[in-house]
Image: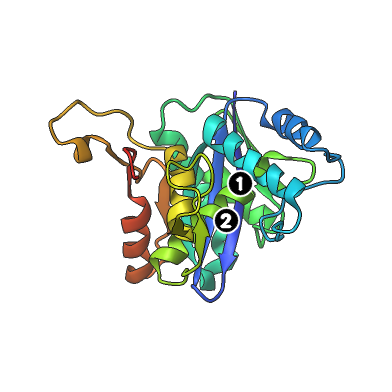
Amino acid sequence: MGHFYIDDSVHDKAGFIIGACVYTDMDINEKIIDLIKSCGFDPDSFEYKSSVNYSKEPGKANVRERLKGLLTDNCSLGVVIIPRASREQLGFECIKAVRQFIEINKRIKKPISIYFDQGMFTSKDKAEQLITSLNFTDCTFYLEQNSSYIKGIQLADLAAHISSIQLKDALGFVTKMVKAGENSGYYPDLDMELGFEMWSTIRYTFFNEGSKLYTDDQIAGATLKVEPYGLYISDLCDKNLSDISRAKFGNIYLGCIH
């Protein structure tokens, strides 16, 4: 059985919204509960939110880092790009994206439960009508879910945040530098762009075309197509946003980036 968890990250100044569709075929909610407990917090009261700054709270920052590990080790990701001005269409575009991801990624296991965070739809009735019209099979949709209870949505929150930093970086809105840190493959005190650091964190998680036949071109052999497997660019996007999103997410290099 498969599960999709869907949340978004809205960026007014940069003019876009990213929806993150996190897929897993395990009981990720129990994993998150155990993770939060192991970090010393009560999973009934603590909820990870990417909008909260945990820089002065190392225990909560540890939850975030361990959630990153859970995301990259146990999940796959598809992202949805729409313009900020079309926010009322966000949930509907995410439904279309999930349909695309399910159809093209044959390893997704059915039946599938699909959970959407609260506030992603202007009309639940219209959302249900769209779901019916797209003829989903073996899929059950759960709209307007509370992420404090459906904890997989917290992973989608994290994935949307990380992906949005990458797109903001590509659009020229991110200039922050961070330390590489331990276990990064770099000198721990090396300064690197935040967008690059985030990219190295999540690049292995995207749905993609899968392995290729070996060639002498090592760069080409380690570069995989993400679109349409893990990238859905809404027709509502203008050419600039579409082109930059496609350049950023359309293909992914999985080789060494050190």
Residue 211 higher or lower than 230, as above or below: above
Residue identified by numbered label 1: 156
Q: Position of residue 253 (x, y in %)?
A: 31, 43
In the rendered view of the protein, which quadrant contains the C terminus? top left
Please state which of residues 99 and 153 is positioned toward the viewer in this rendering: 153
**Residue pictured at 82% horizontal, 46% vertical:** 46
Please state which of residues 241 and 73 is positioned toward the viewer in this rendering: 73
Residue identified by numbered label 2: 161
Q: Horizontally, is 217 left or right of 132 in the view?
A: left
In the rendered view of the protein, which quadrant contains the N terminus? top right
User: What residue type is disc 1 on?
Assistant: Ala
From this viewpoint, which residue is outermost toward the left?
216
Q: Position of residue 98 (x, y in %)?
A: 50, 43
User: What residue type is disc 2 on?
Assistant: His
**Residue pictured at 39% horizontal, 62% vertical:** 235
Q: Residues within 10 Å of mark 2 (few under 14, many from 20)?
A: many
